[in-house]
Every structure is written in C-alpha cells, then in structure tokens.
Amino acid sequence: MTDSTAAPGGPDLGGFIAGLPKAELHVHHVGSASPRIVAELASRHPDSAVPDDPDALREYFTFRDFAHFIDVYLSVVDLIRDAEDVRLLTFEVARDMARQRVRYAELTITPYSSVRRGIPAQAFMEAIEDARKAAETEFSTVLRWCFDIPGEAGLESAEVTTELVERHAPQGLVSFGLGGPEIGVPRPQFKPYFDRARALGLRSVPHSGETTGPESVWDALRDLGAERIGHGTSAVRDPRLLAHLAEHRIPLEVCPTSNVATRAVASLEEHPIRQMVDAGVLVTVNSDDPPMFGTDLNTEYAVAARLLDLDAKGVADLAKNAVEASFQTEEAKTALREEIDAYTAGWTG
C-alpha cells in the first residue's frame, strides 16, 4: 500500500486520515473481499483456480490490463456459490470498512452473477440484508446497495438485473449501475433498463469514461440519466464536459490506485484528479476493489492528499464531498458532516 504518512501536512496526516469518519460511494462487493476471505472461500471451493493461500493471492491480483482484471474478478465471483458465502462476504466487508471509520457506504453488488450461478434470488437478498442489519448493529456502519449490470454479460444480464430490482428489491437498495468493460459495451443500449430502474426511484450511477473517452460520459448523462459517474477519468479531455459536470454538481467517483492498476491511467503522478478539482468538479475518493489493488480507503485518501497538496482540513473537505454526493437522507448527511467537523476540530496531530 501507499505510505499514508507521505501525504502533505507531515507524518501525522496518516493518523488523521485513519480516524476520519468517512463515506464511500464506489466500492464493489466481491472486489472488497480481503485475501483472508478469498482464501477461505477458495478453500471451500477447491475446484476454483483462485489460490487459497493469502500470499499467493498477491501475485494472482497483479493485472496485465483491464481485460485481465475482469477475468480475475470473475474468478473470485465464482467463489460466491450459496447464501452463506454471500452473507459471510458482506458482513466481513463491513467489518473492514468499520476499521477504517467508514460510517456509510454504497456497495456495488452484481446480483446477476450470483443468481446465474444458482443462488435463489430471494436467498441472495435475505443474505445481504441480514449482513447489512448486523453490520449496522455491530459496527455502526450503514450499508446501502447499488445493483449493477455487468456490461460484459450483455443485454440478457441487464434484463435479469432489472427484473431482480422489480421483483426482489431489498430494503437497502438505493441505486442502479453499470460496470465491467467499457470498450465494446456502449452505454446507450442500456437506456431501457435504466429507465425502468429510475421509474422505481433508483438513482443512476454508471461507470463511464474510465477506459473509453469522454463521449461515453456524455452517453451516460444523456441516455442513462447519470447522477454520478463512476471513474470518469477521461472527462478531463473535454473542457465542455468538465464545465457541465461542475455546473450541474454531478460528482465523479474517483479511484486513483484502481485506475493505475487497471492501466486506465499510466501512473499516480499522471492521474487527472487535480484537473478535475481545478475545474470545479465535485470529486469523491473511493477504493473500488481494494484488496485486489493492494489498497484501502485510507490509502486512497492519502494518495489524494498528496496529489492535491491537502492538509487535514482539505482532507476533511474531501470527505464531506462524499457525504454531499451520497444518497443518504439529508438528516443523515448533516449528522455525518457534523461528526467530520467535530473530529477535525479536535484533531491535535
């Protein structure tokens, strides 16, 4: 992981980040499985190609490119084979979030992948809801769900995902997304499915502009009614798009280490987060698939602090961006902002 003490503001900034109450908006369910949990699942399912040794997993999670990342990701998805696996994974992800002082998270879940592998839809929903309620009770971490379409599985997966929303929507569901590869998976074809989900009150949060150009972000805005954009790194290549995002307060869910790991961005030094902020765009910092990328949310805040030359107050303001961009109630947003302000005011590092 990146050394969080390398961020501007001195060695204590890492400690400030570690204790800072946070919200996270772009983090994947299966992609958040720690090596310990992946190894446990792999040992339960020995027919899998996934190593059951946490040390071997570090090499397994080294990606040649985005396509290779998708292949590895799907091999981990294949380890989630019954409702017990789903519940275990979800609860343990919440435990890891709580250790980082994540107070609220919108976890992206791909129910199509589990249902297609034979987990009954109702059992799947009950497992994530049971874990959500237990996590809030035990850790005081509030989880909400984003159900996403796996773009690599095509329109059939879009139909199944939308039907799951219509027939089995769990209580914690707040948004509807689109993940997977962008190249060869144009955003406009998913418009009917987003229309159906939005008609049920779900918010639109597709991935766009990570491995494709700014036009895919425009497509997400025009055709999918996007209220936030997952990644959106290529938006900086279109000044008009940046101005539109800034004017309409459409947040970007930025995941620096992920973008480098998947080769969407060449290096952290070349990451466009500063261009986004300088353009007035509402930027949130997120971890995406943290164990797979050797990171966590605290590390991503330290990376962002370094790239943006932030002190403790600047980091706290960045944390409040995520609160603003979240789909919490206004009352919950106010409470989390106040917690961030109180923590910052009391910081003596």
Image (cartoon, helix red, strand yellow):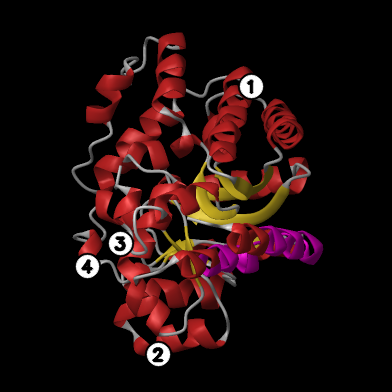
Q: Kindly report the distance in space between the C-alpha atoms of the residues bearing marks 1 and 2.
A: 46 Å
Circle nearer the N terminus (3, 1) = 1
Q: Quick check: 88 left or right of 272? A: right
Q: Which amino acid does label 2 sit on?
A: Arg
Q: Kindly report the distance in space between the C-alpha atoms of the residues bearing marks 4 and 1.
A: 42 Å
Q: Where does residue 56 sit, x and y in percent of width and height?
A: 25, 21
What residue is drawn where x is 56% and y is 68%?
A: 321
Is residue 174 one of those drawn in magenta? no
What residue is drawn where x is 50% and y is 81%?
A: 245
Q: In this view, does 120 lie above or below 104?
A: above
Decide if residue 182 is in sight here: no
Circle nearer the N terminus (4, 1) = 1
Q: Residues within 10 Å of mark 4 (few under 14, many from 20)?
A: few
Q: Mark 2 points at which residue?
A: 240
Q: Which amino acid does label 3 sit on?
A: Thr
Of the 4 image quadrants, the one containing the N terminus is top left
Q: Mark 1 points at which residue?
A: 83
Dot 4: element: helix
Is residue 319 one of those drawn in magenta? yes
Q: Which amino acid does label 4 sit on?
A: Glu
Of residues 16 and 67, the one drawn nearer to the viewer in this rendering:
16
